Amino acid sequence: MDRELGTAVENAVIDMYARCGMLAKAKSVFSKLKVRDRVSWNALIAGHVEQEQGKKALILYKQMRTHGVSPDVITYTCALRACGTIGAIDEGIQIHNELKESGIGKKDVFIGSALVDMYSKCGALVKADEVFNQLPSPDALTWTTLITGYAQQAEIDIALSYFDRMRKVGVKPDQITFLSVLTACNHAGLVDKGEQYYEVMWTDYGLSPSIKHHSCLVDLLGRAGQLDRLMTIMNKTPFQPTMVMWLNVMTACRKWGDVHLGRQAFEQAIRLDSTESAAYVCMANIYADAGMYENAKEIEWMIMTE
């Protein structure tokens, strides 16, 4: 077999194993290669990143450099993603400096997105913002990454301002974007905005809310004490409400002292899974907080008999 053809086939095998999460097999093929080119290294590094093994991915990246194989856009993108996964800000800055010196990917959307992702996940939002604003045409993923970064750092106003900017410049948000926005509203208790964005999903963009979007809105309404509205959402959802959603309803009922609705949510929860101890504990607490100690004891007895 021609050497170049042989290497290409072996690289394809490494890539296949890595994409399927079979990293041990990918490494085994890689270790037997007579020629390990950039494609070989990239396939193995990318596989570790996809399996959230950022530390091992960075070790492979450094080994690749030691063996004299020059990185390309794919390598740098994977390495930056690995840094973000494990919060390796120092390594990320070093890679960013290498990119500046080499000029590689100066206006590449993948590199730019990876830098924004890395800095955002490491909490370096000023740097993420700086990189983002230098990009000529950030895509939806890059916008979402920055919005999520600000939301996770409780910079809710900035996160939502970026979302509004994203819409104004004509970049279409996706379901992940809206989940980040709804999560931000939830953390800040912004009920009106949360409901507004929830409606905008399908009225303006034709996106069907997923179970995660419904769950987030239910939690937001529950925290705000809007239990009637919460139950309207629960009844309208095209999905079967999850245990987490019913537990969120019960938590809200305990907070706002609604024993009747709490009992309804409890019955729905144990119908889903009669062995879920959190449901029993929450219901017992709802009764106890309301001074209904005999009822609380009955629930505690049910826990012991399950």
Image: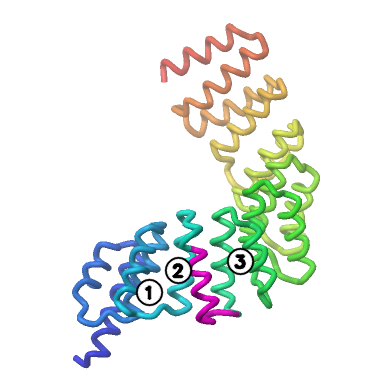
Q: Main secondary structure of the magenta part?
A: helix
Whether label 1 touches label 2, CB < 8 Å: yes
User: Who comes first in sequence, dot 1 or dot 3?
Assistant: 1
Question: SS of the residue at dot 3?
Answer: helix
**Residue at 66%, 53% in the rendered image:** 150
Whether label 1 touches label 3, CB < 8 Å: no
Q: Horizontal and vertical percent for residue 254?
A: 66, 23
Q: CA distance from mark 1 to mark 2?
A: 8 Å
**Picture quarter containing residue 171?**
bottom right
Q: Is residue 202 above or below residue 151?
A: below
> Can you identify the residue that label 1 sits on?
42
**Of residues 238 and 291, the one drawn nearer to the viewer in this rendering:** 291
User: Who comes first in sequence, dot 3 or dot 2?
Assistant: 2
Q: CA distance from mark 3 to mark 2?
A: 16 Å
Q: Is residue 124 above or below residue 300?
A: below
**Of residues 230 and 83, the one drawn nearer to the viewer in this rendering:** 83
User: Who comes first in sequence, dot 1 or dot 2?
Assistant: 1
In the rendered structure, does residue 119 fall within the stretch colored magenta? Answer: no
Question: SS of the residue at dot 2?
Answer: helix
- Highlighted magenta segment, given as a residue range: 92-106
Label 3 amino acid? Leu
**Of residues 9 and 218, the one drawn nearer to the viewer in this rendering:** 9
The circle on residue 78 is 2
| Quadrant where the C terminus is found in the figure | top left
> Can you identify the residue that label 3 sits on?
141
Q: How is the image coloured?
A: rainbow
Q: Horizontal and vertical percent for residue 25?
A: 24, 65
Label 2 amino acid? Cys
Whether label 3 touches label 2, CB < 8 Å: no
